[in-house]
Image: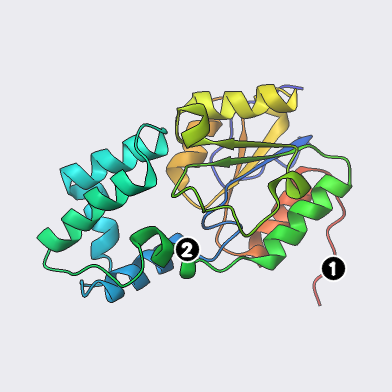
Amino acid sequence: MTSAATTPGVLDEGVTRTALLVDFGGVLTSPVLDAFAALSQECGLAEGEALRLLTQDEQARSALVEHEEGRLDDAGFEEALGAAVVRAGGHLPDRSLLATLDAHMELDTAMIDLVREVRAAGIPVALVSNSLGSGCYDRVDLDELFDVAVISGRVGVRKPSRRIYTIACERLGVAPEECVLVDDLEHNLAGAARLGVLGVHHRDAALSAPQVRRSLGLPVPATP
């Protein structure tokens, strides 16, 4: 099955996809931005400052890349981010930085139930996630939810690289053009779209679930 790449977040209603790729943080959990906002508060920083450090502080940004690609462990990443927090005038929380982030990422049961529904329908499902701490996935049963789990730190490549999506497709035994990806970040969807993967830009389950069901040819319950 082939299809031209579509604009991320816009469904091609004429094509039914046969496999699902799902992000973790911000899709199967509450928004990652909210977790970083809470981290900023616990560190005594301005709102959004913790996330800004990961994009604009060179040492913290490099540490994130190395961590997501599996070249830097949890302790090394936390050391670099912690140093950036202190340089920005903040302080370290009582618990570790990664534990603080995890504590503010609530599981989204509606999206997790959607993954179960899709897999129960016989549709293959892959987790495609950038690493953020070795304990990030401890609250879910990866084997129960997914046919394969492609985690950046384990495969050595991170989103939005096309290679990580190719790995997921190869492990599922499907072509990229057969897949739909649910992700909360548009640049991740754009990377996958270059392979022909259809993107659903996730904001909340009420919007994403009907789009996913339509894209996979599953029934869409009528809204009350």
Does residue 21 appear in this view? yes
Residue 130 in percent (x, y) is at: 48, 42
Q: Is residue 97 above or below residue 142?
A: below
Q: Residues within 10 Å of mark 1 (few under 14, many from 20)?
A: few
Q: Residue at x 83, y 39 (%)?
A: 123
| Nearest to viewer (mark 2 / mark 1) | 2
Dot 1 amino acid type: Ala
Q: Residue at x 29, y 71 (%)?
A: 93
Dot 2 amino acid type: Asp
Residue beneath disc 2 = 102
Badge number at residue 180: none
Q: Residue at x 42, y 69 (%)?
A: 34
Q: Closest to the observer: 212 or 64?
A: 64
| Label total for image | 2
Q: Closest to the observer: 44 or 71?
A: 71
Residue beneath disc 1 = 222
Q: CA distance from mark 2 to mark 1?
A: 34 Å
Does residue 3 appear in this view? no
For the C terminus, give its image quadrant. bottom right
Q: Is residue 116 above or below residue 45?
A: above
